[in-house]
Image: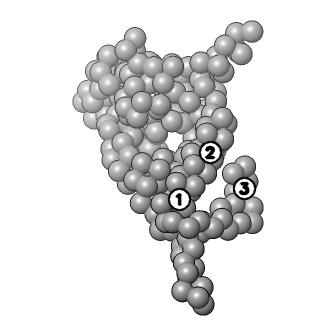
Amino acid sequence: MKNPEPHIIDFINEYMTISGTGDIVWIENKRDSHGKVIGKIGESVGNVVTVSGYKYATYTVRKEGNETVLMLSRVAWYLYAGEWPTGTIVLKDNDPRNFSIDNIAMYPDRTAHVISQLEKSIKSANFNISKKTYKDGSVMFYVAIGDTYSLRSKKKRYYFKTEQEAKDFRLDKMRERLDYLREGMVELVDVLKRGKS
């Protein structure tokens, strides 16, 4: 993910900070181009929006007819670490306004999306199990699964006598993959500790 333009970084540095409660707030009154106060000192920056069922806190910076939408979770990482995040930022408690230091983590790009999809699938357990019927009328249920540790591995079929056995096996494999992907998470707290060493 590319870094924002220098004027955006300057804007963040000039107007935003993280409060003692873990929210991003205005350092000083923010005025629009007509001089009207649109953000008061200590008030929360931006709004919470819902996109595809997920809630995000955002703020739109307008300059010379251009608009840049900032994800405030990325701004929070920057305000703490002093560098723009290189991956996908997640707020561990899913509260779009909780930017406390121990609530922020980063996954390599796209990993957060895969984790989110796996969590939804595991929670709902709503997926189809394939079925193979043999000439003698017997039926076997199967799951085609690739290597847990690779996104592009060739899939192998695992056969079971019952649909429930196949479903349980698939859920176990999904949980295993989820655990593996979560190991790649970088905690902001750890980044800051390394910086002080």
Asked whether residue 71 is in view, the answer is yes
> Which amino acid, mark 2?
Glu
**Secondary structure beneath label 3:** loop
Q: Name the residue under label 3.
A: 147
Relative to 14, residue 196 above or below: above
Q: In which quarter of the image is the N terminus?
A: top right
Q: Picture coordinates of residue 18 (x, y %)?
A: 44, 18
Sequence order check, earlier mark of 1 and 2: 1
Q: Quadrant of the C terminus?
A: top right
**Secondary structure beneath label 1:** helix
Which residue occupies the extreme left position in the image?
36
> Which amino acid, mark 3?
Asp
The local crowd at label 2, few if under 14, some if 14 to 19, many if 20 or more residues have their Cα within 10 Å, is few
The local crowd at label 3, few if under 14, some if 14 to 19, many if 20 or more residues have their Cα within 10 Å, is few
The local crowd at label 1, few if under 14, some if 14 to 19, many if 20 or more residues have their Cα within 10 Å, is some
**Residue appearing at x 56%, y 56% in the figure:** 170
Q: Which of 127 and 70 is in front in this view?
A: 127
Q: Distance between the residues labelled 3 and 2?
A: 11 Å
Q: Nearer the viewer, residue 124 or 83?
A: 124
Q: Name the residue under label 2.
A: 176
Disc number for residue 165: 1
